[in-house]
Amino acid sequence: MKIAVDAMGGDFAPEAIVEGIARTVKAGLPDGVTLVLIGQESVINTLLTQFGVTSGGEVEVIHADEVIDMGEHPTRALSQKPNSSIAVGFAQLKAGQIDAFCSAGNTGAMHVGALFSIKAIPGVIRPGIAGFVPQLNGGTAVMLDIGANADCKPEVLAQFGELGSIYARQTLGIESPRVALLNIGEEEQKGSVVAQAAHQLLKENKRLNFVGNIEGKDLFMNRADVIVADGFTGNTLFKLGESFYEVTKQLGLHHPFIDRTNYESIGGSPIVGVNGNVIIAHGISSPTAIQNMISLAIRQVRASVPAHIEQALT
């Protein structure tokens, strides 16, 4: 298994990325797993040496001399910088040379790169970005979408329920994931026209364990294993949840549950619905976040999520 990481992507790249890789190697990789760093080779090798790791064996380096900056236009940057770390990463993924591609770099470029290289799985209307929401009972819910699709038609929201259900079953081991639609009330007739139509589509899908609407107050209350939302609402609520860790830290408070709302605890968010394993991390990713992102990527590769989605949709 080869897990590739964009060494040049992120607010604190390449130092934080390479340090995260070095920590992962020193902690011990699972048998058969190789980490691949993509970016400016001389810079990466210097940092690997600085952090006590050498390339070769468990760590490979693939040279890419260009970098897509965080503020660049995604489509334009990918076309104008074919030798960027993100473009080279997707070329490697498309060619089957790596099993997963992870980056804390330009989110738009990662999403566009996935859609134009490995492409959406046949039958998927719009791939979404999944977020992981800790539950008070110790479990985890998958929220889909958290930012890829700000505006969604009812059919897209309904399919998020199906994609999220497959993801939760394969990666979290939940046999019959409870699927809920995020809304402004629990009643069927609540919400926008789009939300009401999506509710009916989810309700009619016999392949789903649809439990109805949930409200924002239910986010952490173990009411669902899959939370369906459009990208605008999902992103807003998900980032509100992530803010709890910083707020409580500034207030001098601590609780193990709040630790799980820290973005570092998972390390990244997968793009669900594309023909490959793509993980997007926070731009502010620390070495700890990179370590956890790699663990997430390994679990996802082992779960063969894209294959299961393709099988379900055909």
Image (tube, rainbow, N blue to C red):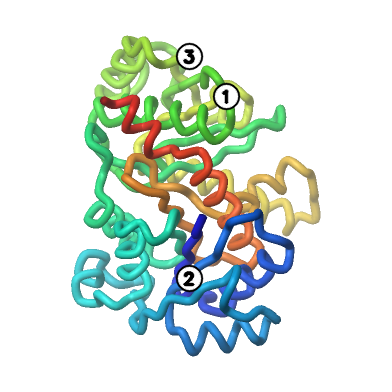
Given the image, on which type of amino acid does mark 2 rest?
A: Gly
Say above or below: 171 vs 265: above
Q: Residues within 10 Å of mark 2 (few under 14, many from 20)?
A: many
- Between the C-alphas of marks 3 and 2, the distance is 38 Å
Say above or below: 143 vs 56: above
Report which quarter residue 38 is drawn in.
bottom left
Say above or below: 160 vs 180: below
Residue at mark 1: 174
Report which quarter residue 250 is drawn in.
bottom right
Q: How far across and how far down the image is residue 222, in percent?
A: 62, 24
Given the image, on which type of amino acid does mark 3 rest?
A: Val
- Between the C-alphas of marks 2 and 1, the distance is 33 Å
Residue at mark 3: 211
Asked whether 248 or 84 is in front, the reply is 84
Mark 3 in CB contact with mark 2 (< 8 angstroms)? no
Relative horizontal placement of residue 225, taking residue 40 as reference (left or right):
right
Mark 1 in CB contact with mark 3 (< 8 angstroms)? no
Residue at screen point 36% across, 84% down = 65
The numbered dot on residue 10 is 2
